[in-house]
Amino acid sequence: MNSEHDRITTPVTADMLRGQLDLEATAHGLLPHRLPARARRQIPDDQLAVAEAQPSGVRLAFRTRATSIELDTLPTKRVYRGFPPPADGVYDLLVDGRLTAQATVAGGNVRTITDMVTQSSELSEGPVGTARFTGLPGHDKNIEIWLPHTEITELIALRTDAPVEPTPGDGNKVWLHHGSSISHGSNAAHPTGTWPALAAARGGVELVNLGFGGGALLDPFTARAMRDTPADLISLKIGINVVNSDVMRLRAFLPAVHGFLDTVREGHPSTPLLVVSPILCPVQEDTPGPLMPDFSTGTLRFKATGDPAERAAGRLTLNVIRDELARIVEQRAADDPNLYYLDGRELYGEKDYAEFPLPDEIHPDPATHRRIGENFGRLAFGDGGPFAAETGGLAPHATSGGIVGA
């Protein structure tokens, strides 16, 4: 065993990272981003700017015989004024694909949200910390360190007691996914416990997760980022943020969906593309947004504040969006044989809600993330699914476990 003084410091470089679209050099180290710089310059609000910098699905990947690994980082933790701070974000260490150890990093910067509606905030700077993993097996092995999915994480230094080298590509397909806070991993207990990470593990694919808390709003810059990102499989989970932020009416929503799909198809004309509508969310099924925080029970919950009668005037609800997404996919499928639709209630529906209710009426808990990940893995990656090795088993517009295939 090497002594503390014999540790090897290895620079963190782009070829050691997966799941990010860009790396920013900071005064401290490297900051992974899930949107490229061009897109970030067009972000209109702090909420999305923070969400895209939170490294959901981003991980270091390398090969080593090391039994001890230290990763220095500068986290930025998010707290809400008047509420106790959340637990420190978790770093998951996988050995040859198996979750083997976890760590946290204390300290760091603190971003205090001063207004839950506008997401305005104040930043206090803090110190660098270290995630430590010891007692690892001494043989050659592939290591992945998944970064905390809801903590902005600047990477400072990697130290080990044996040399490391980037993990060679294993030939797995790349799955590019875009969605809301549910895809981002809100309320998941750790980064490999988000439903996209769980589904990716089941499918044996490399995940690039563009799930952004509050930020799945059919933004053109996100569509262009997806267009320009290499991918073998693509999914879009659309709807919940459009409703709960009340940013558009039906007249704007329909061409926005078409435009988003057109842009993605410019870069991926024949890639399997799965459009997923919202999971069950009772407070928004037939009530328009905007969504507002509700503290009447003594805990944070959310409620929809729109008028259901205004659906006739184009106000959006989840049921309206599901109907329109299914219609759009069916229409486009005549010219796009690799376009599919999945009703989100196949991932989490009434029976699931009865077993695993949404704690705040919007976001799933860790058990529900597992349920959604299992269902997506079965429906998308399983036999006959659009992401299976052979996707020709679905007849035009036939259904198989909730999937509509083109």
Image (spheres, helix red, strand yellow):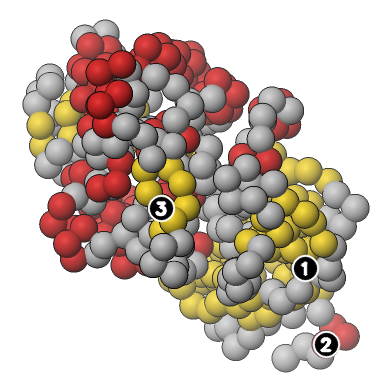
Question: Is residue 182 toward the left or the right of residue 358 in the image?
Answer: right
Question: Going 15% across and 52% down the picture, which residue do you hit?
Answer: 350
Q: Quadrant of residue 38?
A: top right
Question: Is residue 12 toward the left or the right of residue 56 in the image?
Answer: right
Question: Going 73% across and 28% down the picture, which residue do you hit?
Answer: 41
How busy is the neighbourhood of tag 1: few (under 14 within 10 Å), some, or many (20 plus)? many
Q: Quadrant of residue 358?
A: bottom left
Q: Mark 2 = which residue?
A: 4
Q: CA distance from mark 1 to mark 2?
A: 24 Å
Q: Give the mark toward the camera: 3 or 2.
A: 3
Q: Does residue 223 appear in this view? A: yes
Q: Mark 3 = which residue?
A: 302
Question: Going 35% across and 64% down the picture, which residue do you hit?
Answer: 359
- Amino acid at pointer 3: Phe
The one nearer the camera, 274 or 122, is 122
Give SS at disc 1: loop
- Amino acid at pointer 1: Gly
Question: Is residue 204 toward the left or the right of residue 21 in the image?
Answer: left
Question: Going 57% across and 45% down the picture, which residue do you hit?
Answer: 117
Cβ–Cβ below 8 Å for labels 1 and 2? no
Residue 11 x, y percent position in the rendering: 81, 59
Residue 297 vertical position relative to residue 31 in the rendered view, above or below: below
How busy is the neighbourhood of tag 2: few (under 14 within 10 Å), some, or many (20 plus)? few
Give SS at disc 2: helix
Q: Of the numbered discs in the image, which one, if any, rests on residue 108?
A: 1
Q: Earlier in the sequence, mark 1 or mark 2?
A: 2
List the single residue furthest toward the right: 27
- Amino acid at pointer 2: Glu
